[in-house]
Image (spheres, rainbow, N blue to C red):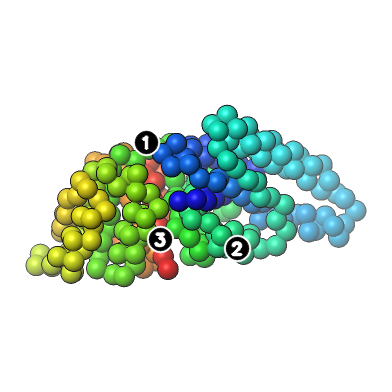
Amino acid sequence: MEKILVAFNETRFSNGAFEFARQLNKRQPALLTGVFLPEPSYQYIRKFEEETAGIYKDFIEKEEEIAADNIEQFRSLCKKSGIDFRIHHGFLKSIIQELKRETKFADLLIISSEKFYDALGINDPDISLEDALHTAQCPVIVVPELYQFPEKNILLYDGSESSVYAIKQFAYLLPELCSNETILVFLNEEENATIPDEDEIKELAAQHYTNLEILKLKMEPEKYFSTWVNEHKNAIIISGSYGRSVLSLLLKKSFVTDLIVEHKLPVFIAHK
C-alpha cells in the first residue's frame, strides 16, 4: 500500500484515526494524506457570511483557528513519527464530492466514526458517514476513538461477490495483518444452511490468511452477532459494501452503534 487518506472534520481531530494510520505506517511505510473537511454547518454559515455584513466574522475566525491548530497537530505528529505526509484542506464545494475525488487517488481511507459523525447530525442534508462509505472509491477503515489495534481478523462471508471482494482487498492492502488469527464467519438463521462455494472460499482464504478458522453461526445477525463480536475485542471486521451485507443489518440506525462504539472495533469495508 502506497497512499493512505485520513479524513478529519476540521474542528474535531481524531486521535483514533491518526493512531491507526501510524500503526499501519510502522508495519508498511506509506504516504499519509490528511484531508481536513469543514463541517457542513460551517460551509453554510460562510456562504451566508459572504452575502451579509459580516455578522458571523468572529465565529468564522474561531473555527478557522481551531482548524489551523488541528492541521498543525497532524503535521507535528507525522514529523514526530517519521511519516511522509501531505495536507489537503480549504474545500469549498460539496464535502461528499471532495471526499469522493480524494479517494479516487488513494489506496485506503481511514475515518473516525465518532469524530466524523458527531458534528454532522443524523439528518444533515449535505453529508453523513453512510454517504461517505457509499461514495468512497477506495476501501475504508472506520475506527472508534478507543480500541485495541487488531490482532484478529473477522471476515464476514455470505457468498456474495462483495464479501469475497472485501476479503481479497484486505489481504492485498494489509498483508502484514493476514498472519493474525482469522475467523471466516458465515451467518444464517436456517439450521440446514450451507456455506456457499465452501471449498472455493476456503481455498482462497487459506492462501492469504495463514491462521484461518471457518465458522458457521446459526443466529439472527441483527439480534445476536454483536454479542458474539463482544468476545473478540481486539479484532477488525472485514465486510463487503455497506448496504448489501450483514453489516448493513447491524448498522441500520447509524454507524455509531453498539458494534463500533461499545465494542470498540475497527471495520474494514470494500466495494467495487
Mark 2 and mark 1: Cα distance apart in space: 31 Å
- Quarter holding residue 46: bottom right
Q: Is residue 115 left or right of residue 221?
A: right
Q: Secondary structure at mark 3?
A: loop
- Residue bearing the label numbered 3: 270
Give the distance between the C-alpha atoms of the residues marked 1 and 3, in whole angstroms. Answer: 21 Å
Horizontal and vertical percent for residue 163?
31, 64
**Percent of width and height locating residue 85:** 60, 42
The residue that label 1 is drawn on is 148
Give x and y (percent) for residue 58: 82, 42
Q: Is residue 148 above or below residue 239?
A: above
Q: Is residue 218 above or below residue 179?
A: below
Provide residue 133's location: percent of width, then percent of height: 48, 60
Work out whether 243 lies above or below 260. below
* Mark closest to the chain's N terminus, 1 or 3: 1
Residue in the image at 52% along x and 51% along y: 3
Instruction: Tell whether label 1 touches label 2 (CB within 8 Å).
Output: no
Residue sitting at 64 percent across and 36 percent down? Answer: 75
In the displayed structure image, the side of residue 195 where residue 267 appears, left or right? right
Q: Residue furthest left?
A: 192
Q: Which residue is mark 2?
A: 101
Q: Tell me the element at label 2.
A: helix
Residue 36 - label: none
- Badge 2 amino acid: Arg
Image quarter of the C terminus: bottom left
Q: Foreground: 139 or 257?
A: 139
Q: Quadrant of residue 143?
A: top left
Q: Choose between 61 and 210: the one closer to the eye.
A: 210
Closer to the eye: label 2 or 1: 2
Query: Disc 2 or 1, which lies upstream in sequence?
Result: 2
Q: Residue furthest top?
A: 80
Say whether disc 2 or disc 3 marks the residue closer to the N-terminus. Answer: 2
